[in-house]
Image (cartoon, rainbow, N blue to C red):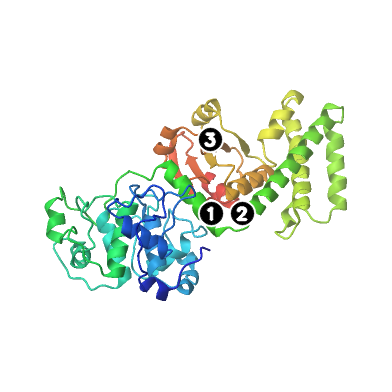
Amino acid sequence: MLRLTSLLALLLPLPMTVGAMAFTDVADSYPYAEAIEYVKAQNIVGGYEDGTYKPDNNINRVEFVKIIVGATTDTATIEGCYTDDLTYTDTDNEVWYAPYLCTATKAGLVEGYDDNTFKPAQNINFVEASKIITLAMGYETTVGAEWFTGYVQALAERGAVPSVTTGPAMKVTRGMMAEMIYRLKTETQTAGALSYEDLMAVADQAVTDDEYTDEMITEEEMFITQMEEMLAEETNMEADLESEDQILDQLEADIEALLEELAGGETMQDEAADDVADDTTDETTDDETTDDETADETTDNSAADAADDTTDDSADDAASDATDDTANTAAGNGVYAEYTAEAYSDLQASGAKFGLFFHAPWCPSCVALDNELQAYGELIPSGTTVLKIDYDTAPVTMKSDYGVTMQHTLVVFDTDGTYDQTVLSVTGDQIAQYLQ
């Protein structure tokens, strides 16, 4: 969990010294330089690993919620929020933003959309941001002509509507966000701030409470944001990744040794007999494996499963196909294989349900699920297939068509080959449910 400054410290403005900027891409002459320096000094917003702030980049809905909740709510309240109470269909209750989204939802800062989604990766517009920050700061509002009138007026009265704002639907940038927080926290008025009337004069159209566009945060921004949060929150991530790599290396070595034995003349029947003998000696079956097992036990069981796969496949396939089936078919009825354009096209015409698992080697949860699907084939229902596709190299049009904005995503296709649904942070047990 990210370390947050206490609420008391956040409410006490620090002396500002603009001149030696903390970010390489924010010059002293930048319009919001003082505000950006303030949010940095208050630990409200950090920069990127390369020393930049990217003030002109848009900010998405869940990032804005995280920043505002972190700046206005004490750590104990955030960490104590029961994230399982969140019911949005497109968010993950186990990731870095969950405690902040939980806190914002329970405090009434956000409600989501009519279809029970939150659209976390969607860039936030000005009036949505106005509602969240006004309620978080506890300002009184009045009812106006539009649902957002009171929220915008509350900001305008405090000189916190940035002069660059071109209308209610304008997307908020990281620089604008810093300016809004700075003006409200320090109660600093500025002659360039817009009034409510100014804002509405440049508005081209009314904005409804659930308006959104298909514009999403760029893949580069999402990648950087996720990596920044993961590095900050997971202090032992590097050790975890090393452990995952060791498991993968050992599993590959065991499978390679098994295939060499097969090539050397050992029959499939002998393998099956060996497996039965091993199972008799080992009192712990695959289904009885617990989280407390060591990495070596996991590797051994995975190798045993791979041997069972080879034995089962040999009963149905020719000996020449045994190697391919061992690599692509997990220890059950379903198939888990690497993505190819040809395989994807064939599955669309096959009349069977299938899924695309968007995997990234730098994502610990992706690696864990990949290991699980290779070791436990019963997770994939009979007659269905899951293709593993690299998130970073997958066709941009494919990710756009299926709404894939982050790694560890499963896209499900129906029996007629048409798109069914996109599921974030899917687990092994859930895959069977979605492919039934």
C-alpha separation, residue under disc 2 versus residue under disc 1: 8 Å
The answer to whether any part of residue 113 appears in the image is no
Location of residue 112 in the rendering, given as x and y in whole percent from the top left corner = 34, 59
- Give the CA separation, mark 3 to mark 2: 38 Å
Q: Residue at x 44, y 55 (%)?
A: 91
Closer to us: 350 or 412 = 412
Q: In this view, does 387 lie above or below 362?
A: above
Residue at the image position 66 percent from the left and 34 percent from the top: 328
Q: Distance between the residues labelled 3 and 1?
A: 37 Å
**What number is the disc on residue 352?**
3
Determine which quarter of the picture holds residue 199.
Answer: bottom left
- Other-residue count near label 3 (Cα within 10 Å), few / some / many at <14 / 14–19 / ≥20: some
3 and 2 marks in contact (CB < 8 Å): no
Q: Name the residue beneath numbered marker 1.
A: 230
Asked if the residues shown at circle 2 and circle 1 are in contact, with their CB atoms under 8 angstroms apart, the answer is yes
In the shown orientation, is residue 179 left or right of residue 330? Answer: left
Residue 65 vertical placement versus 338 (above, below): below
Frontmost residue, 74 versus 45: 45
The residue to which callout 2 is attached is: 237
Which residue lies at the image location 56% right of the left edge and 42% below the top edge? Answer: 360
Q: What secondary structure is marked by label 1? A: helix
Task: Find the residue positioned furthest to the bottom.
Answer: 8
Q: What residue type is labelled 1?
A: Met
